Image (spheres, rainbow, N blue to C red):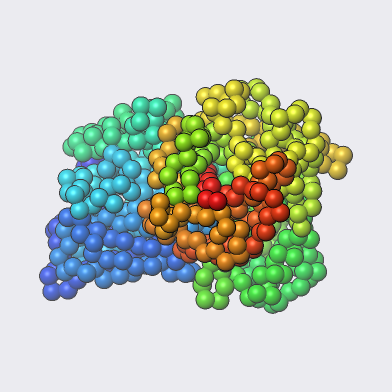
Amino acid sequence: MPYRFAALALTLLLASCGGGGGGSSGSSDASAAPTLRGVAATGAPLVNAAVSVVDGQGRAVGTATTHATDGSYSLTLSSTSPAAPLFIQVRGMDAAGAPQVLHSTVPAVSSAMVAHVTPLTNAIVALALGTEPAPVFAAASSSGSQLTQLASAAPAASTFLKTLVKTQISDLKYSDATALDLLADATFAANKGAHDLLIESVRVDLARSSRNLPLLQIGNKFLAAPTAEVVVELPTAQTELLKSSGTPTNAITSTLKAATSATSLLGTLSGLDELGAALNRLIAQGASASTITADALLTGYDKHDSRTKADLASLLATYSAANRQFGRFQLLGCADDAPASGTCAKVLVGALVSDSTGAVVDQFTDAVSYNKAATANKWNLIGNGKKVAFGIYPLAYRALNADGSANSSVSPNPVIGLQVEVQGQGAGAAQLLSSATVQLPGGFSIPFAYCGRPLLCVSATAGATSVVPTGGVADVALPRAAVGWIGTADSVRAAKFVASYTLAGTAETRSAYLRADVLGDPATSRFATLDGISTSAPLFAANLQSGTLSISWTTWAAANPDLRLIEIKRVFTPTAGGAPTVLDTAVPLPGKTAVTLSTSFTPVDAVTSELWLQAVDSQGRRFHTRYTGKV
C-alpha cells in the first residue's frame, strides 16, 4: 500500500477510536477554543521546557511550560478557530544536560488534540517539511505553503519513519506497527514503556551533506561509535511523501535502510526507573556517605571517569543533605569499549537533579548494569571503570574586540577544528596525569601534558610532563588551519580517537568518537555574545578585573535556543610572559542567562584581560567566544 494511503487509513482509524489528534475538518467548533496536550520527552521528560504553538497561518495560538516531573503540558488555544495544521515547538534541556529544540504537529484540528514532542516527532516534521523545522517555525507567519505541506505529508512521514526503526519496533514487541501513533499516542508517557524506549534506543539527528542538503540521520544508540546508519535526504523524501504513490525510500543514501538494534538490552530496560526510585528513597532518608557506600545500590561500583565509589557516595550524601531528588534516567549510549552485537553491558545514563520546588540544580551522569539474578533493583550503578575522562568534540572559536566587533588580528576568524579533553585533575583539583598521547584517525599522534588546569594541555614538546597553559582555547584545540596533521577523516562524525596514558604506574587506553561533523563555516550568530556591548559601551579590562561585574547573554540565548552556555572564565596573562591567572565562574543552568563575576583580580604587572564563553549544542559541538578587555 502506498505510504500516503496507509498513513491516511491509520489516521482515520485512530480518529474513529478517539486516539489521535485527527478529524477531517480544518477548524474546530467555534463555540469553544480547542485544547492541546502532550508529553515532551527525549526518553526522560523534558521538564520546565517552553512550549510554543502556531497554527497553519503562522499565528501564535498558545504557550505553556512542561511539568517539572513528567514533561507533560496542557493548554487551551487562544483562537477558537485555528487553521490547520498546528505546529508545536519545545525548548528545554534534556537529562544529559544537552539543549533541545524539538517539534511536532497536529495535521488536522479538532476540539481536543494530542501532540507529543520527541526526537521522533521532530524527525516526522523534518521529513514532511523537507528541511530543518526550527527555521520554518521561526518564520511561520510567512511559511504558509510549507505549513500546508507539513499537514499533507506528516501522516506519510510517520509511516515512513517507522520503517527506519522497524527493528526496534519489533524488539519492543509491537505486534502491529500501524497502530503506533508517534505523534498522538494517547497512552504515551516517559516511563520506560515501549514507546518511550523506542525514542531512547535510536540517535536521531539533523545534519547537512557536503552539498549542503538537509539530512535526517538515524542510528542504533548502543553502538560504540555514534554511527549514522540510515541517512535520508530530506528534500527528496518530502517530494516523494507528497505524492499519492511516492517512494520515500528513494531518499535513503545509506547502505542500511533501517537502523540496527540492541535487541537483548531492550528487553531489560523497562525496570531502569526502579533504580532512580530506590536512589531517591535512600536520599530522602538522610543517609550519610558511609551508609550510602555500604548500600546494595552501589555494590560492584568501580569508578566512572576517575570518580570513585567514595566520591559517588559523598555526592549522593550532598544531595541528601540538600533535599535533592533524581528525575527519570535517560539512556545516553553504551560504555563498553566493544559492545557485543545486540546488547550493551554498561549503559550510560543521565538524570537531572532537582530541589523540592522542581527547579533543576544539577545534572548527573554515570553508567549502570543489569543483574538478572538480583531479586530487587536488577539495575545498579556500576561506573564505566575508567580512571580518567576523555572526549573529542567539533570546535569553533571566534575572537572579538572589547566592543563586540570581530578581531582582525585573528585569521581565520572563526577558527574551526577539534577540541580534545583529557582529564588532568580529579577531586579537589588533585593531579591525575602528567602526560598523554592522543592518536588521530589519520594515524598522527598529538602529545598532551599537565598544565595545572582541569584538562591536560596540548604540548609542543613530545614527552613533556608539564607545560604552561594559555588559559584559552589553545590549550585544548587542534585547529584545522594550524595543525597540519588534521585531515578530513579526523573531522567527520564517528571518527575514532585513542588516548594513551599511565596512571599510578598502570598504562591505559581510551577511545572517544566524534559525535558530529566539524562545521565548515559556522555562522557568527552561533557564538555567545554579551548583552549591552557596543562601541559606546565596550568591555573594559578594569571591569573584568573587578569582583562586581554582572554579565548577561539573554539576547543570544533567545536567538539560539538549541545552544547552552557551559563555561565562563576570565584569563589574565602577563604581557611580559609567564603563566596566566584563570578565574572560572560557575554557569547557571537554563533558563538563567545572567551571572556576576564575583572574584576580583589585582594585577602586579601589565596583563591582557580576556573573557571566554563556551557554548554547546545538542550534538556536542563547542562554540568559543573570546572578548579582549579594553585597557
Quarter of image, res 59: bottom left
Does 521 appear above or below 351? above
**Image position of 152 (left or right of 120):** left
- What residue do we see at 67% from left, 59% from top? 602
Measured as percent of width and height from the top left, residue 38 is found at 35, 63
Location of the N terminus by quadrant is top left
In this view, the residue in front, 548 or 212, is 548
User: Could you tell me how many numbered marks the image carries?
Assistant: 0
**Image position of 159 (left or right of 25):** right
In this view, the residue in front, 307 or 605, is 605
- What residue do we see at 34% from left, 53% from top? 103
- What residue do we see at 65% from left, 67% from top? 279
Measured as percent of width and height from the top left, residue 557 is found at 42, 56
Measured as percent of width and height from the top left, residue 244 is found at 18, 37
Quarter of image, res 577: top right
- What residue do we see at 48% from left, 44% from top? 400
